[in-house]
């Protein structure tokens, strides 16, 4: 029963900021998305991204991650920067440009509009030199100019009093600056080199905020990605009052669960007046008899009335049930382990390689909306036969599915509680690139409506793993608490974790006490989707 929450936006360092052959921009439709529940009905952000050269797919990946985040604040529109038209910016509350391709041809209309507008502009990484070259007095107006990429090893970004991590293997560089007027050019955070010296991670001057890298590569639960997530409040919702909420989800509960363990968890959380969510799969399968002396097992919730009774008890104690797949495994495939429920993937293929790492392989055989719908329908029937109301929230097993699957989940539920996988083609409207080398994963420190259209309840600090597995280190309560502390950098963010009931309640008590001690208030999943 493992969760692969370690898969985030891991991309090759060599790709970041790499010079690429320039090709003419192609016409791509403007993608649009609605804001998350509770977002401003008047805020709309324009997201522009690079699309030329062999790494054009990376620009779209980063743009998807950006649109996901800005959806927390309101609606958005996105398209390649190459198709920008003069005056377009005026229709939006703000613009975010993601510069991922070195020397991407940027329309002069966009450069001129950025220099002329009073609306907030966020510019990430590459091609700032095109903006400064277009201005006759950039250094005078903004109080700084760029110097060049500093490729020192940087493993920390200090943001408003919080030390956030940055993977030192990310050697793509961070822009360094020459500051001429510190009253105009203000550092938004400091990049800390290995020798302890610092330089601005980004600079805000007037309505222009420049970030010297793209903070979506190699992200972890306490990463400088959180600084960017908070920075969006300054740009899109500057009047936001600080608030820190926490969530807990009880994970991998199936017909094979121990009712006593479920009741013990419910009793503890109820005693603390903590609402919680329970992730339930309705059918247990062990087609090879791995856990039953070679004899296959296959049964549903209806055939385990004591488990159903425990689930109803959890509901009475403040629990909300969500659907965590149908069988949490796939047929008789080792996907990647043993075809046993809660061990394996259901909507994505994976294997364990020779180095004991889990490797994602792509969509399942026969992947289709019909296949997904059939599994969800079968699960709903199981819930009904067990006397349980079918849930309205979905969590794909091991947080993995194809783009087609995610779109189908959205049509069937509209709300997920997870971290998502995102694929090139989804945003641009082209053929979806399902290659695992081009997909990205993303967690959220607040509720979003992602590019698939689903409201996503966040899970962002992981789970307890007492022992190392598949090249992942052990994760203990102190680790989750440290991640929660880092997430305080997000002014209205969450610390959301999940927990396996077979671990007992001791670890759970430690995490809850630690998170509450940081000032977080535990809320229900429903509180995160309130409009």
Image (spheres, rainbow, N blue to C red):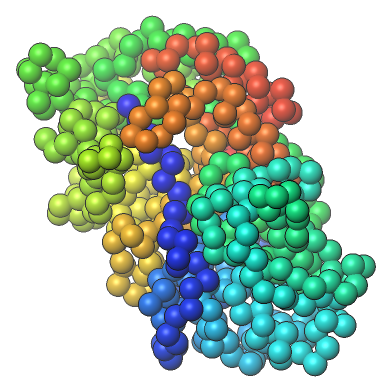
Q: Residue furthest front?
A: 195
Task: Please determine whether, in this image, residue 12 is positioned above or below residue 455.
Answer: below
Residue lying at 53% horizontally and 44% vertically, measured from the top left = 220
- Camera-side residue: 55 or 401? 55
Task: Please determine whether, in this image, residue 112 is positioned above or below residue 413.
Answer: below
Viewed as shown, does residue 426 lie left or right of 361? right
Residue lying at 49% horizontally and 27% vertically, measured from the top left = 475
Q: Position of residue 341 (x, y in %)?
A: 24, 28
- Quarter of the figure that contains the N terminus: top left
- Camera-side residue: 152 or 244? 152
Residue lying at 55% horizontally and 83% vertically, measured from the top left = 103
Q: Position of residue 454 (x, y in %)?
A: 45, 52
Task: Please determine whether, in this image, residue 135 is positioned above or below residue 250.
Answer: below
- Camera-side residue: 377 or 295? 295
Q: Residue furthest left?
A: 295
Determine the image quadrant of residue 208: bottom right
Q: Position of residue 347 (x, y in %)?
A: 26, 45
Viewed as shown, does residue 369 lie left or right of 277? left
Count the numbered circles shown: 0
Q: Is residue 11 visible?
A: yes
Task: Please determine whether, in this image, residue 264 is positioned above or below residue 139.
Answer: above
Residue lying at 65% horizontally and 26% vertically, measured from the top left = 515
Q: Position of residue 21 (x, y in %)?
A: 42, 85
- Camera-side residue: 370 or 482? 482
Q: Is residue 312 visible?
A: no
């Amino acid at each position: 029963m493992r969760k692969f929450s370690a898969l985030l936006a891991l991309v090759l360092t060599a790709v970041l900021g790499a010079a690429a052959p320039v090709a003419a921009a192609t016409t791509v439709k403007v993608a649009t998305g609605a804001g998350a529940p509770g977002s401003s009905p008047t805020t709309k952000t324009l997201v522009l991204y690079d699309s030329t050269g062999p790494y054009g797919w990376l620009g779209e990946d980063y743009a998807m991650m950006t649109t996901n985040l800005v959806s927390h604040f309101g609606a958005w529109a996105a398209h390649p920067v190459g198709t920008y038209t003069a005056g377009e910016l005026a229709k939006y509350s703000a613009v975010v440009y993601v510069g991922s391709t070195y020397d991407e041809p940027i329309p002069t209309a966009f450069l001129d509009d950025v220099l002329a507008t009073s609306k907030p502009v966020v510019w990430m990484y590459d091609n700032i030199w095109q903006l400064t070259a277009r201005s006759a007095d950039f250094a005078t107006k903004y109080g700084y100019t760029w110097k060049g990429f500093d490729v020192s090893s940087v493993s920390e970004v200090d943001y408003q009093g919080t030390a956030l991590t940055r993977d030192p293997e990310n050697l793509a560089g961070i822009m360094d600056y020459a500051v001429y007027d510190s009253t105009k050019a203000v550092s938004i955070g400091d990049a800390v080199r290995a020798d302890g010296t610092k330089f601005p991670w980004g600079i805000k001057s007037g309505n222009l905020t420049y970030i010297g890298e793209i903070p979506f590569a190699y992200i972890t639960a306490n990463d400088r990605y959180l600084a960017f997530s908070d920075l969006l409040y300054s740009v899109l919702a500057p009047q936001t009052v600080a608030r820190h909420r926490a969530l807990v989800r009880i994970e991998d509960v199936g017909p094979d669960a121990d009712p006593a363990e479920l009741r013990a968890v419910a009793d503890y959380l109820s005693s603390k007046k903590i609402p919680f969510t329970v992730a339930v799969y309705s059918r247990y399968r062990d087609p090879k008899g791995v856990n039953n002396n070679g004899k296959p097992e296959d049964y549903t919730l209806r055939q385990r009335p004591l488990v159903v009774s425990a689930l109803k008890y959890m509901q009475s104690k403040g629990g909300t049930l969500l659907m965590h797949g149908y069988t949490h495994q796939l047929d008789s495939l080792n996907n990647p382990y043993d075809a046993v429920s809660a061990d394996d993937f259901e909507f994505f293929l994976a294997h364990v390689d020779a180095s004991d790492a889990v490797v994602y392989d792509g969509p399942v055989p026969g992947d289709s909306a019909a296949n997904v719908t059939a599994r969800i329908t079968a699960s709903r029937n199981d819930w009904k036969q067990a006397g349980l109301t079918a849930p309205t929230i979905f969590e794909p097993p091991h947080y993995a599915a194809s783009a087609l699957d995610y779109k189908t989940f959205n049509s069937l539920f509209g709300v997920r509680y997870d971290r998502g996988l995102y694929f090139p083609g989804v945003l641009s409207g082209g053929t979806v690139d399902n290659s695992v080398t081009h997909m990205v994963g993303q967690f959220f420190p607040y509720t979003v409506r992602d590019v698939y259209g689903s409201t996503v309840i966040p899970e962002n600090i992981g789970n307890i793993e007492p022992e190392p597995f598949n090249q992942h280190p052990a994760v203990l309560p102190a680790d989750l608490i440290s991640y929660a502390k880092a997430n305080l950098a997000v002014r209205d963010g969450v610390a959301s974790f999940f927990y396996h009931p077979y671990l007992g309640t001791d670890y759970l008590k430690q995490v809850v006490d630690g998170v509450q001690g940081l000032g977080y208030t535990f809320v229900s999943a429903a509180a995160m989707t309130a409009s």
